[in-house]
Amino acid sequence: MTTLINAANESLDTAKRQQILDGARLCFLAQGFDGASMNDIVKAASVSKGTVYAYFPSKEKLFEALVYHDRREQAEQTVHHLDDARPMREVLIELGLRMAERMTSADSIAQVRMVAATSEKFPEIGRAFFQAGPAFAIARIKTYFETKMAQGQMRQVDAEMAAMQFIDLISGCLHKPRLFNAQDLFTKRTPELVVSAGVDVLLNGLSVESKR
């Protein structure tokens, strides 16, 4: 009986925490980090101020938790499964398109801007963003590349660096222009074109044949 009660309480705690995060997300996206107040978040989450502070001691810690939650969820959805039995180009193009879709969404761009603006004063927010998102994706892609090396389909290189370079090949022409409101400079480059070209650049440099 005690175990069932504890499990139920844990479920309620998780649901309440998610409720607060969902309310905070609405406020931060609408008003920005500086503009959103804890009172605004309390109203948006439909909870008491005491409940919010029971989970998060400050607005900074709440934003840090939200950033970590959202980035980890996005990263998991993006690199959830990299099938090493399928052709590399096919797998990487699918991965690149998922990355492009998620990293260029309006909510994602808005959150990245907020993190960049707050990270100098609150470096733990920037670290939470990087650890939950980019670092998580890099680790998964690194493991995939190491598997392809072991299978003899990739040259022996720094797999972590290759993973970072792959992400940069995708984000450079899609994410960064939108981040800086310069997307009009790249209107002719569709995600399909960018991802296909990026994958080709990577494979031309890392395939076993390219060494010969």
Image: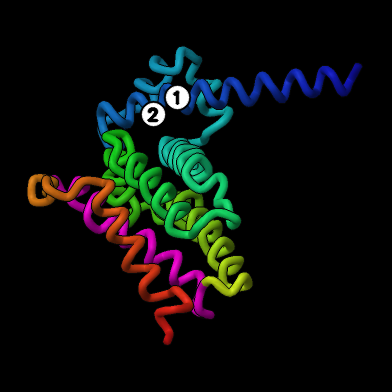
Task: Write down the region rendered in magenta.
Answer: 154-181
- Per the picture, the main secondary structure of the magenta-coloured stretch is helix
* 156 in the magenta segment: yes
Q: Position of residue 141 (x, y in %)?
A: 51, 59
* Residue at position x 56%, y 61% in the image: 144
| Between 183 and 62, the one nearer to me in the picture | 183
> Going by the picture, which residue comes out furthest to the right?
1
Q: Which label number is shown at residue 22?
A: 1
Viewer-nearest residue: 73 or 111: 73
Pick out the residue farthest to the left.
185
Please tell me the numbered disc located at residue 25: 2
Q: Amino acid at mark 1?
A: Asp
Residue 120's image quarter? bottom left
Q: Quadrant of residue 199?
A: bottom left
Question: Residue drawn at (39%, 23%), measured in percent from left and top?
Answer: 41
Residue at 36% x, 40% y: name it. 102
The kind of secondary structure element at disc 2 is helix
